[in-house]
Amino acid sequence: MASARDLISIFVALETISLPTFVLAGWRKHDTRSNEAAIKYFLIGVLSTAIMLYGMSLVYGMAGSTLLSDISIASGKSQPALFAVAIFMTLVGFAFKISAVPFHFWAPDTYEGSPMPVTAFLSVASKAGGFVALLTIISFGFFKSTDSWQPVLWVLAAGSIILGNLAALRQTNIIRMLAYSSIAQGGFILVPLAVSGDNNAAKSGFEGVVIYILIYAAMNLGAFACVIANARRTRSTEISSFAGLGQENPALAMVFSIFLFSLAGIPPFAGWFAKFVMFRAVLDAATPSAVVLGVLAAVFSVVAFFYYGTVVREMWFHAPADLGDTSDRKIPVALVAALSLTVLVVVVVGVYPQLFARIGDLAFRVG
């Protein structure tokens, strides 16, 4: 998908990513919740794919080619209003993959019903794939037609940030909280892309998306690894099951706190740099619409700290529940390795952000 420069190859790559995830979501075939998760994911996925393919067919009809280079030339010329409609419909499929509002309905139920390792995979790999495709098709195909795609991305970003954070505040289940958090984080990742068409902000916008995706992957995978480790201990995914974790397992509580603070964008962890590149793109754009989006992102970054802080408070300031004998619930070596790797990335990038800054600059130059 990352190397695709043609609508057909992008579509095939997107579906190649999607089909296995439909199966993975329903992996526990005798579990009704898993079945429900897979069906919702599949039905909404098929619907969004149909709309996207129809949009691509309209783009092909007006550009006369499926090559992004030819579509880019066509988007720079005067086009009928139907061309903007075609771009909107094409973006719908990608909005589903990144669970952007209002195409997010599958995410909370699918995340909760899927096996937790699958949920971790969906929250990162599926979202990263969608963003890579979205970045590719806009930068190489639709970029010159800013009036068509930029308002769509602005609305998707604003809606995802607002609804994702507000919904996460009300959750009592950690999986659903992280699902809505993932929707909100998707909105934050969309911000640099949504303002990249303003005042030569393309470089900082595209770099911001790439850097944020990489940091988000480490933070979210680490957070889900902590949830899996705690679920083995408590047999529960309720936020209340984290009560007293700081006394029971201080190392796991400390690592999970690092991931939560990083997701909230608090220094010195990597999340602060992800927020920094997002706001840098907004400042480079410096248009009224970009400033409004930046203010929304700033306000709801503060809101996000409340629900992340709720979990931290449960771990460190609440008494642990009586779980009986937990000697047979040790964290597997593979899970410890995953936690070690992700926390290393989050801490190192937070202290030395130039590491990912160079990756983002390289990605823009290669593109």
Image (cartoon, helix red, strand yellow):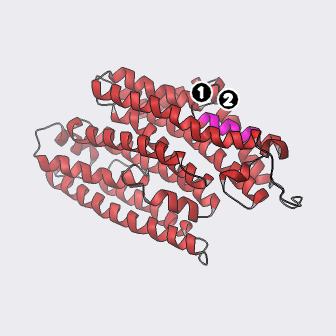
What residue do we see at 56% from left, 54% from top?
176
Asked whether 344 or 16 is in front, the reply is 344
Position of residue 74 measured from the top left corner of the image (x, y, whole percent): 17, 42
Residue drawn at (22%, 45%) of the image:
71
As drawn, the label of residue 355 is 1
- Give the residue type at disc 2: Val
**Quadrant into which the C terminus falls:** top left
The crowding category of the residue bearing disc 2, from other C-alpha atoms within 10 Å (few below 14, some 14 to 19, many at least 20), is some
Q: Are marks 2 and 1 in contact (CB under 8 Å)?
A: yes
The number of numbered discs placed on residues in the rendered structure image is 2
Label 1 element class: helix
The numbered mark, 2 or 1, whose residue comes first in the sequence reads 2
Provide residue 214's location: percent of width, then percent of height.
55, 39
Q: What residue is at 34 percent from the left and 47 percent from the top?
A: 5
- Residue 282 versus residue 175 in the image, above or below: above
- State how far apart marks 2 and 1 are (Cα): 9 Å
Left/right placement of residue 43 relative to residue 126 reads left
Is 22 on the left-hand or right-hand side of 120?
Answer: left
Q: Which residues are magenta?
A: 254-262
Whether residue 2 is visible: no
Q: Examine the rendered structure and indicate whether residue 26 appears above or below residue 184.
A: below
Determine which residue is flagged by label 2: 348
Q: Left of 40 or right of it: where is 176?
A: right
